[in-house]
Amino acid sequence: MEIKEMNLKDVEERLNAIREEIENDDADIDALETEVRNLNVRKEELHTMETRRKEKIMEIRSGMGEVIRTFEEEKKLNRTFAPDTIEYRDAYLKNLQGKTLNAEERAAISATAVIPTETMNMIVGRLELVPLLSAVDMTYIPGNVTYPVEETVNDASWVAMGTAATDSSDAITSISLGAYKLIKTIEITADVAAMAIPAFQNWLVNGLANKIQFAIDKAILTGTGSNQATGILKSGEVTNTGTYTKAAMKYGDLMKIIAALPTKYLSGASFIMPRAIFYGEVLGLEDSTGNRVVVADAQAPAKFNILGYPVIVDDNCSADTVIFGDLKEYKFNFAKAIEVKADESVAFRTGSTVYRAMCLADGKIADKNAFTVFTKATA
């Protein structure tokens, strides 16, 4: 059935089906994303048609001298909606667009100004699509956060039967994550007010969240730690370092990089390198028996493994640099989740609206021993 012929029940059934299809390994994510966008547009059309139908009925009843507002309708106007409801989402986004809200919609957003759950889930989903962001330990804990970190931990000891165990001198330190401000603004003409709610929501997520995720990705790798997250490559953060062959990466260099990481971190380790190194030097490498060291992931051919370890190709990684380590030992926390606000006053002369996405976040390495960094030799 074509989408334009679907009723509301058909749309909801198809959206539920897509939620299951998207989990399949061979799912066409781009096609499903496009279909969801079109289904949401159709749902908005159906809601609009139903609203207009009810308004016409009320107009007819009014002309017949009947009472328009019933007790149930009065209750509806006075109720509020949680951020996870469609009513709240529509009211929130219409308010951002500058559209006029009816009494019910004004009531929906009067209790709270938080971003709708559906919109927030779309933003978080966008963040999780970025390989580096999905690999690190990302949390959403309000305020400053302190993580305990093992500094000196002794192994368990074998003790003879009937003999008391001796306490070991373990040491625990900690890292603290603050709340640095991250902002992205977009100025858009008044045309955005004419968008349907689903289309506007997609534009908002694409235009603002994508920029936020790029800034976070860059900070995780090269952040200075001054009013922003501390990156893995910040000078002094990782002390386990080395160099690889200047002319081009060799199989022996990969062996040296892997050998430099302590054994306990290998099970969760990944490579991170810029595109030029991966496609220019690593992709065609062979081991001593002529086997390729890089293979495509059987379940996701667009992903690659180097000698069995996942590789993240990211141009935010410094040139001629290869990182190898357990990314779960990098902590990134949103002290305040992404919020979106609109302001028409800053572009009064042009009739435009400025949309601002802002969050408070911080990140840094929890265990520097979990990473090794190799750079190209100078000679």
Image (cartoon, rainbow, N blue to C red):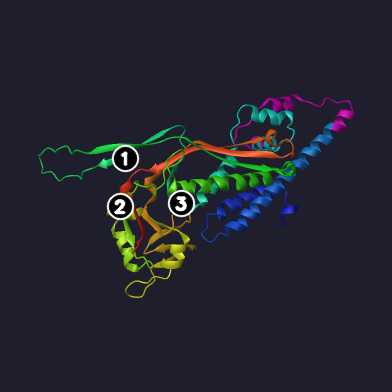
Residue carrying label 3? 132
Q: Residue at x 61, y 53 (%)?
A: 33
* Residue at the (30%, 52%) spot, across then down: 240
Q: State the CA–CA distance, disc 3 to disc 2.
A: 21 Å
Give the mark nearer the N terminus: 3 vs 2.
3
Q: Is residue 297 visible?
A: no
Q: Residue furthest front?
A: 379
Q: Label 2 is placed on what type of residue?
A: Asn
Residue 6 or 159: which is nearer the viewer?
A: 159
Sort mark 2 into few (<14), some (14-19) or many (20+) by Cα contacts within 10 Å. some
Mark 1 element type: strand
In the rendered image, residue 89, in percent from the top left (x then y), is placed at 64, 37
Cα gap from disc 2 to disc 1, whole angstroms: 18 Å
For the N terminus, give its image quadrant: bottom right
From the viewer's perspective, tell me whether residue 45 is left or right of residue 374. right
Is 151 drawn above or below residue 20 in the view shown? above
Question: Does 70 sit above or below residue 215?
Answer: above
Tag shown at residue 149: 1
Mark 1: amino acid? Val
Q: Secondary structure at mark 3?
A: helix
Q: CA distance from mark 3 to mark 1?
A: 22 Å
Q: At which x and y percent is residue 361?
A: 47, 38
Q: Residue furthest right?
A: 64
**Residue 113: where, in percent of width, then height?**
61, 31
The residue identified by callout 2 is: 240
Residue 219 is labelled as none
Name the mark nearer the viewer: 2 or 1.
Answer: 2
Magenta stretch: give its range: 59-88
